[in-house]
Image (cartoon, grey):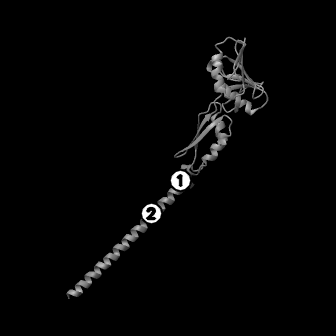
Amino acid sequence: MADRARTVDASVRLAARRRERLRRRVVRVAALAGVLVVVTLTGWLVFLSPVFGVTTVAVTGTSVLTPEAVKAAAQVPLGTPLARLNTAAIMARVAQLKPVAEVTVTRSVPHKVTIAVTERKAVYALSSGKGFDLVDGSGVEYTSVADAPKGLVVAAISGDDERLRRDVATVVGAVPQAVRDRAVLVTAKTPDSITIELSGGAEVVWGSAESSTQKAQVLTALLGVKGTVYDVSSPSHPTTKS
């Protein structure tokens, strides 16, 4: 009798364990199914649905450019889910605008894209005959104006020479502020014949853009000597003429 009771008890425990294993298996499967549903729904919401689609494009940092011009170049596809937006392609398109030095594109949930532009900074104004082209430190002409901005050095360059534009930018960036304030015109006919006309009729013979930092230091000392021509084209052997 006792053996039968033990057998029945063991069978009950075995059945209970089987039911518990089955319950746990069902719970795991249900949990996994729930996770898959959530992941699928989230993926659909983020990557396919218009819930997080682009509806607003903002532009910051413009002065030469207008926000409208940047938006037109960016060609942001409205309605595209933020997660699928090709920000690299947008930045590449905006970077083609000449006044743009740098650009970043950020996404803000739920619907906004911000295009932050850093524009080029003018180092000098290049006379074009019909007005002036503003040129940055890399020698890039990025916009035209009718009049040279106040305080900006004016330059005249022979032909459309990218190297000359870049060399003049190097020279203008190197000259002391006191010389920059007196500069009437920077002339560059060739890469080795850059000159600076100063107010009062004096002239600085700079030569090439090489060793511009050293030339600037030498010129600062030379300006203490009264003269009409200051030649720093060979900074180790500068000369002056009265």
**Is residue 39 at least partly visible in the picture?**
yes
Which residue was labeled with disc 2?
34
For image coordinates 64% across by 47% down, the residue present is 89
Question: Which residue is painted at 44% across and 65% down in the image?
Answer: 32
Give x and y (percent) for residue 18: 34, 76
Whether 25 is drawn above or below 125: the answer is below
On the rendered structure, is 12 left or right of 189? Answer: left
Screen quadrant of the N terminus: bottom left
Residue ID for mark 1? 46
Q: Quadrant of the C terminus?
A: top right
Which image quadrant for residue 6? bottom left
Is residue 201 shown above or below 41? above
Q: Residue furthest front?
A: 237
Name which residue type carries label 1: Val
- The location of residue 151, given as percent across then percent down, is 64, 20
- Marks 2/1: CA distance? 18 Å
Specify the label residue 64 is tagged with. Answer: none
Viewer-nearest residue: 223 or 182: 223
Give SS at disc 1: helix
Location of residue 61 with respect to 39 vertically, above or below: above
Looking at the picture, which amino acid does disc 2 mark?
Gly
Q: What element carries label 2?
A: helix
Is 85 situated left or right of 183 in this image? left
Residue furthest toward the right? Answer: 159
Question: Which of the 4 image quadrants contains residue 167?
Answer: top right
The residue shown at (53%, 53%) is 46
User: Dot 1: within a 10 Å radius of its alpha carbon, few (fewer than 14), some, or many (20 or more) residues?
Assistant: some
Q: Where's residue 200, x and y in %?
A: 70, 12
Which of the two labelled residues, at mark 2 and mark 1, occupies the earlier sequence position?
2
